[in-house]
Image (cartoon, helix red, strand yellow):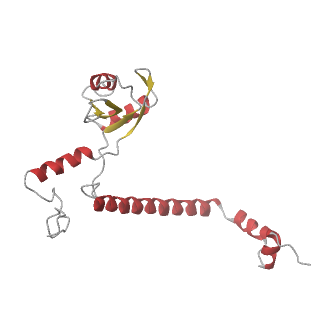
């Protein structure tokens, strides 16, 4: 007959003693534990930054970003789940309590002009943007609970690069290293 192996059998045959390891963990003092956790946090943060940089480079290569170093503006909120009847002026009036010069732009279908039920609201300061984010998420606007988050869009920056491109700078302000000037026509 064969002996059924379970976790304790495998660990016992490998010379691993479960109680011994837990005793060693208990002996680790609080300062050492705290230092180990800080090191782990720094490593994770460094890994996240490398991942973000790698993703930005990939998006630049795909043509989704004008440059990998471009960052989304910190004074713009993304607002979604809007009622189709909500207008730019309505949003500007609502967000004016945080910044009297707040500018709202509801994104519309280019063919029909109908609201796509999301918008971007630009503030003059980051502080007013943060305050609006904290207070307006899940607020009721025109019988709809809206969602508010910080914008990740670089569309405004893109338009600046496209404008440069139309004015004769074929790189769009970026040296992409293509022999054909970035036109993609192969010669």
Which residue is drawn at the image coordinates 20% and 65% (left, top)?
A: 176
Residue at the farthest right position: 1
Q: Please state which of residues 25 and 116 is positioned toward the viewer in this rendering.
A: 116
Residue 10 image-quadrant placement = bottom right
- Residue 55: x percent and y percent? 37, 60
Could you tell whether 81 is left or right of 103 in the image? right
Q: Please state which of residues 161 and 183 is positioned toward the viewer in this rendering.
A: 183
Q: Looking at the figure, which quarter contains the C terminus?
A: bottom left
- Residue 164: x percent and y percent? 12, 51
- Residue 84: x percent and y percent? 36, 26
Q: Looking at the figure, which quarter contains the N terminus?
A: bottom right
Which residue is drawn at the image coordinates 44% and 59% (left, top)?
A: 48
11 versus 147 height, above or below: below
- Residue 19: x percent and y percent? 79, 67
Q: Please state which of residues 125 and 12 is positioned toward the viewer in this rendering.
A: 12
Could you tell whether 159 is left or right of 69 in the image? left
Q: Please state which of residues 99 and 186 is positioned toward the viewer in this rendering.
A: 186
74 versus 30 height, above or below: above
Residue 126 image-quadrant placement = top left
53 versus 3 height, above or below: above
How many numbered callouts?
A: 0
Residue 2 image-quadrant placement = bottom right
Which residue is drawn at the image coordinates 7% and 55% (left, top)?
A: 168
Residue at the farthest front position: 111
Which residue is drawn at the image coordinates 30% and 60% (left, top)?
A: 62
């Amino acid at each position: 007959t064969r002996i059924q192996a379970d976790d304790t059998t495998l660990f016992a045959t490998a010379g691993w003693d479960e109680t011994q390891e837990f005793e060693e963990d208990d002996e680790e003092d609080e300062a050492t534990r705290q230092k180990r956790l800080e090191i782990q946090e720094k490593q994770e943060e460094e890994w996240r930054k490398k991942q973000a940089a790698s993703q930005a480079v990939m998006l630049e290569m795909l043509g989704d970003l004008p440059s990998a170093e471009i960052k989304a503006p910190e004074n713009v909120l993304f607002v979604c789940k809007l009622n189709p009847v909500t207008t730019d002026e309505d949003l500007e009036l609502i967000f004016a309590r945080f910044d009297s010069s707040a500018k709202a732009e509801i994104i519309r279908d280019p063919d029909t002009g109908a609201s796509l039920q999301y918008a971007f609201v630009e503030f003059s300061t980051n502080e007013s943007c943060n305050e609006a984010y904290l207070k307006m998420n899940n607020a009721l606007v025109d019988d709809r609970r809206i969602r508010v988050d910080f914008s990740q869009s670089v569309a405004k920056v893109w338009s600046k690069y496209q404008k440069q491109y139309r004015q004769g700078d074929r790189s769009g302000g970026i040296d992409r290293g293509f022999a054909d000037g970035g036109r993609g026509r192969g010669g």
